[in-house]
Amino acid sequence: MSVTLKDVEHVAKLARLALTDAEKERFTEQLNAILKYAEKLKELDTDSVEPTTHVLPVKNVLREDVARPSWPVEETLAGAPDEEDGQYRVPAVLE
């Protein structure tokens, strides 16, 4: 598979990029070099390699979710500028 100048122009149009002729040529060469390198990967024997979604063994590193007592309402609302019925009272935001 190779990228043509027409392919680069099409992608540039989709991305709404204004490319010079020199840029189009350069991108065509660069994209073809990338594809050529990717073709090398097909030469590797990956039959014994297990599929993975990450190169490192990743596990959940979060702590367990354990219920514990919360702060008393009076202490929580002690610094509130305005409070009503045990809740913070804030100005209405209407647009």
Image (spheres, grey):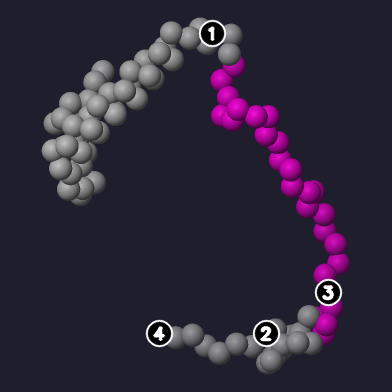
Instruction: Name which residue type carries label 1.
Output: Asp
Residue that mark 1 sits on? 47
Residue that mark 2 sits on? 88
In contact (CB < 8 Å): disc 2 and disc 3: no
Q: Magenta: predominant secondary structure element?
A: loop
In contact (CB < 8 Å): disc 1 and disc 3: no
* Label 4 element class: loop
* Label 2 element class: strand
Q: Residue at x 18, y 26 (%)?
A: 4
Q: Is residue 68 left or right of residue 95?
A: right
Q: Residues within 10 Å of mark 2 (few under 14, many from 20)?
A: few
Q: Residue at x 29, y 29 (%)?
A: 30
Earlier residue among tags 3 and 4: 3
Residue 85 within the segment the image draws in magenta = no
Instruction: Name which residue type carries label 3.
Output: Trp
Earlier residue among tags 2 and 3: 3
**Closer to the camera: disc 4 or disc 1?**
1
Instruction: Name which residue type carries label 2.
Output: Tyr
Could you say where residue 17 lies in the image, as x and y percent from the top left?
Answer: 21, 48
Indicate whether 63 appears above or below 36.
below
Magenta-highlighted residues: 50-75
Q: Is residue 66 left or right of residue 45?
A: right
Indicate whether 22 appears above or below 86.
above
In contact (CB < 8 Å): disc 3 and disc 4: no
Q: Residues within 10 Å of mark 4 (few under 14, many from 20)?
A: few
Say the numbered circle drawn on residue 95.
Answer: 4
**Closer to the camera: disc 1 or disc 3?**
1
Residue that mark 3 sits on? 71
